[in-house]
């Protein structure tokens, strides 16, 4: 759709917003990955993440060194507390009477406990914001499977029936893209003045197995047929938007940019999306690039995979190469992103009531679906129940 905002700007006009109405929903669930909050939490947390894979504790302790380096504390829970508070404040200031709760997949507060508390509070129609903006098994369907698992467990306990829906992908919503544009400009300004205009933009996201990338999205999705499927297509669309807005803001046309990957965790013999960010920095150095800005468009907040993989490993690689680098901030609890969540809530609520609301989206792919097809982003191991499909 066309939108009266530019990727780096604010609204320039439009129809007056009607009184906010979230009906038929009576609560919003902020659903995230979770992370350890102390050294004793690290291995149990990783056991939750890798449940069913038979990974020995010794190997988990090895992997946990990323967390131990930061005192065993992942930033993600504190960042979710900030987002939770920002959502509650924004909703209250805009007259949206919708309680907001928070649950995690892999650490306290656990999803099933939060849903139980929501049921006890009388909530029955729940809308979910997952802290993952893109299509894909790990970033979308697995969250929906976790919701289905939790609801099944609560049903066995005799908890009143809950209906849970998930907000659409928001990677190309103006409230997500705009903050990324601004943070990229801020990062460029951190570089030495003599290299700012020629610095390369390095857009980063989580690497996933190539087989999983190819099956991301629904089979009838036009982007499914592209290399890397919908997952890669969505990231490329955001990268183009941000790069274009940065060019407009700086007056520097033709700045080099690339989509690269980070945080690979799979077996070496299984192909994953490449190039890795550190390998890409080496390539830029060989090619004579003067500087680079890392832009983590694949992440909602500055959690461990940003703090370690970019701020620690990638920065160390750049220092070794003598390549000046800066890193753009993620959207976090930016007021524009918080407002976007409110807009998405009201959009979905209006749709459920039979209206046809404006669905804001930048780029070439348009606004995503509210309900995923059953065969969307399939589980790579075996089919499992998931909420929000039909």
Image: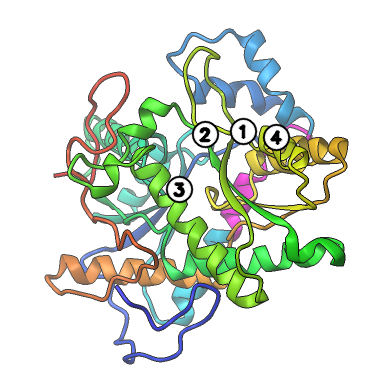
Q: Residue at x 59, y 22 (%)?
A: 44
Q: Do tag 4 and tag 1 residues touch (Cβ < 8 Å)?
A: yes
| Secondary structure beneath label 1 | loop
Between disc 1 and disc 3, whose residue precedes?
3
Q: Which residue position is annotated with label 3?
A: 132
CA gap, disc 2 to disc 4?
13 Å
Q: Which residue position is annotated with label 4?
A: 278
Magenta stretch containing residue 80, yes or no?
A: yes
Q: Residue at x 49, y 64 (%)?
A: 241
Between disc 1 and disc 2, whose residue precedes?
2
| Secondary structure beneath label 4 | helix
| Residue 316 x, y percent position in the rendering | 82, 37
Q: Which residue position is annotated with label 2?
A: 207
Q: Residue at x 38, y 34 (%)?
A: 213
- Crowding around mark 2 (Cα neighbors within 10 Å: few <14, some 14 to 19, many 20+) is many
> Given this view, does label 1 or label 3 mark the residue nearer the observer?
1
Q: Is residue 25 above or below residue 379?
A: below
Image colouring: rainbow
Residue 248: name its quadrant.
bottom right
CA gap, disc 1 to disc 3?
20 Å
User: Position of 342 compared to 307: left or right?
Assistant: left
| Residue 177 x, y percent position in the rendering | 50, 65
Q: Which residue position is annotated with label 1?
A: 276
| Residue 260 x, y percent position in the rendering | 57, 41
User: Position of 180 compared to 160: left or right?
Assistant: right
Task: Give the magenta-colored segment's residue range.
Answer: 70-82
Q: Do tag 4 and tag 3 residues touch (Cβ < 8 Å)?
A: no
Between disc 2 and disc 4, whose residue precedes?
2
């Amino acid at each position: 759709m066309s939108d009266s905002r530019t990727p780096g700007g604010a609204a320039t006009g439009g129809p007056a917003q009607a009184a906010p109405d979230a009906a038929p929903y009576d609560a919003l669930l902020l659903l995230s990955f979770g992370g350890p909050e102390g050294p004793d939490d690290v291995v149990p947390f990783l056991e939750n993440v890798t449940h069913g894979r038979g990974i020995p504790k010794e190997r988990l302790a090895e992997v946990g060194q990323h967390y131990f380096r930061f005192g065993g504390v992942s930033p993600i829970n504190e960042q979710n507390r900030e987002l939770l508070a920002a959502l509650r404040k924004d909703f209250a200031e805009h007259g949206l009477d919708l309680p907001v709760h928070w649950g995690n997949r892999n650490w306290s507060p656990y999803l099933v406990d939060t849903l139980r508390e929501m049921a006890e509070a009388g909530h029955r129609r729940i809308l979910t914001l997952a802290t993952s903006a893109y299509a894909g098994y790990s970033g979308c369907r697995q969250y929906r499977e976790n919701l289905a698992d939790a609801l099944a467990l609560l049903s066995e306990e005799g908890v009143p029936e809950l209906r849970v829906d998930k907000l659409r992908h928001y990677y190309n919503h103006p409230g997500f893209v705009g903050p990324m544009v601004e943070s990229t400009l801020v990062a460029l300004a951190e570089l030495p003045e003599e290299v700012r205009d020629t610095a390369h933009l390095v857009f980063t996201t989580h690497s996933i197995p190539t087989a999983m990338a190819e099956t991301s999205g629904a089979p009838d999705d036009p982007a499914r047929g592209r290399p890397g499927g919908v997952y890669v297509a969505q990231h490329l669309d955001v990268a183009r938007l941000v790069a274009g807005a940065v060019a407009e803001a700086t007056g520097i046309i033709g700045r080099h940019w690339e989509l690269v990957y980070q945080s690979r965790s799979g077996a070496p013999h299984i192909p994953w999306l490449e190039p890795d960010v550190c390998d890409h920095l080496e390539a830029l150095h060989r090619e004579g690039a003067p500087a680079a800005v890392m832009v983590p468009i694949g992440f909602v907040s500055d959690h461990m995979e940003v703090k370690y993989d970019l701020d620690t490993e990638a920065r160390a690689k750049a220092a070794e190469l003598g390549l000046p680098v800066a890193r753009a901030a993620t959207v976090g609890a930016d007021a524009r992103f918080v407002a976007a969540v409110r807009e998405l809530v009201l959009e979905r609520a209006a749709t459920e009531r039979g209206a046809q609301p404006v669905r804001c989206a930048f780029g070439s792919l348009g606004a995503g679906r509210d309900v995923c097809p059953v065969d969307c982003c399939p589980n790579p191991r075996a089919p499992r129940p998931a909420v929000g499909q039909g």
